[in-house]
Image (cartoon, helix red, strand yellow):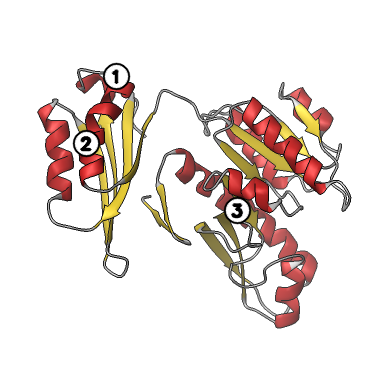
Amino acid sequence: MHRQRFYTLTASCPDRTGIVAKVSSFFAAHNGWILETALHADDAAGRYFMRIEVRADSLPFMLAELRERFRPIAEELEMDWKITDSAVKKRVVLLVSKQEHCLYDLLARWQSKELDIEIPCIISNHDTFRGFVEWHGIPFHHIPVTPDNKAAAYAEVQRLFEEVKGDAMVLARYMQILSPELCAAFPGQILNIHHSFLPSFVGAKPYHQAYERGVKLIGATCHYVTADLDQGPIIDQDVIRIDHSDAVEDMVRYGKDIEKTVLARGLRYHLEDRVLVHGNKTVVFR
């Protein structure tokens, strides 16, 4: 990560010749100092992906004007695109249930500035972590979820997220299935950590499923949330080797370490605009 302020362009478009030339020429024409470039051509999809960081102080205009000046090029190339500012901290809302390991890890990374974000609030379907969260100076919202109140509960989650102007919602072992309406409201903004190496062992108790199947690897997956359970675009994954001597309890203990790491890494990629979604797949410029 660069110390100086920079703008990040992320874009995808139909593949063709001259894409890089047009974009780089645009920045060069305005004395833009490119700090980092990542490019990928997907031959099967016929699509081109890019991520470019440019020093903010090298350009003669601010972000709003940069976007307006770049728009004609984006339209010509039929781009899905955005430009973000490294000086603007992302606002991340955490959702948690009763398991604490991912919550503790993310708050430690936030407190140490390893994750340079704002956490405007934390939401839970249990009151378990209220004291811990409020000790950190973060507002805590208890929104119980029952079979009878799900629509109202998730409407309240959406209201809070919009009220605090959230940029990302992170399910830090939030053990409820979000409503399709909530998923549809924030596509590509809700991240989940699933405690298996997807697409294996979706749904509840994946370590128990893995134990019964006798697998030799267990893992964790950070993915975007969609209305289809545990089927969203995958951001990051990792695994650890196990054997016949490991009980379910051992697998749960090993898995917690992987879950923390994978969620933090996937969230960082998302916050740094390194993840481009196309269909149900991602391009991750690490």
Q: Amino acid at mark 2?
A: Pro
Percent across and percent down for residue 1 are: 37, 35
Is the C-beta separation of discs 2 and 1 under 8 Å? no
Local SS, label 1:
loop
At numbered mark 3, what does the secondary structure look like: helix, strand or loop? loop
Residue designated by label 1 = 62
User: At which x and y percent is residue 154?
Assistant: 74, 42
Please name the residue shown 73% across and 68% down the image: 207
Q: CA distance from mark 1 to mark 3?
A: 33 Å
Res. 194 mark: none
Left or right of 97 in this view: 265: left
Tell me the residue at 52%/47% (across/down).
188
Q: Do callouts 3 and 2 mark residues in contact (Cβ within 8 Å)?
A: no
- Dot 2, crowdedness within 10 Å: few (<14), some or many (≥20)? few
Q: Could you give the CA–CA distance between mark 3 and mark 2, rounded to whole angstroms?
A: 32 Å
Q: Which residue is mark 3?
A: 225
Marks 3 and 2, the one that precedes in the sequence: 2
Residue located beneath label 2 in the image: 72
Distance of mark 2 from mark 1, alpha carbons? 17 Å
Residue 4 visible in the snapshot? no
Residue type, mark 1 in image: Met
Q: Are there few (<14), some (14-19), or many (20+) residues within 10 Å of tag 1?
A: few
Query: Is disc 3 surrounded by few (<14), some (14 to 19) or many (20+) residues within 10 Å?
Result: many
Position above or below: 49 against 87: below
Q: Is residue 22 above or below residue 84?
A: below
Dot placed on the residue nearer the N-terminal end, 1 or 3: 1
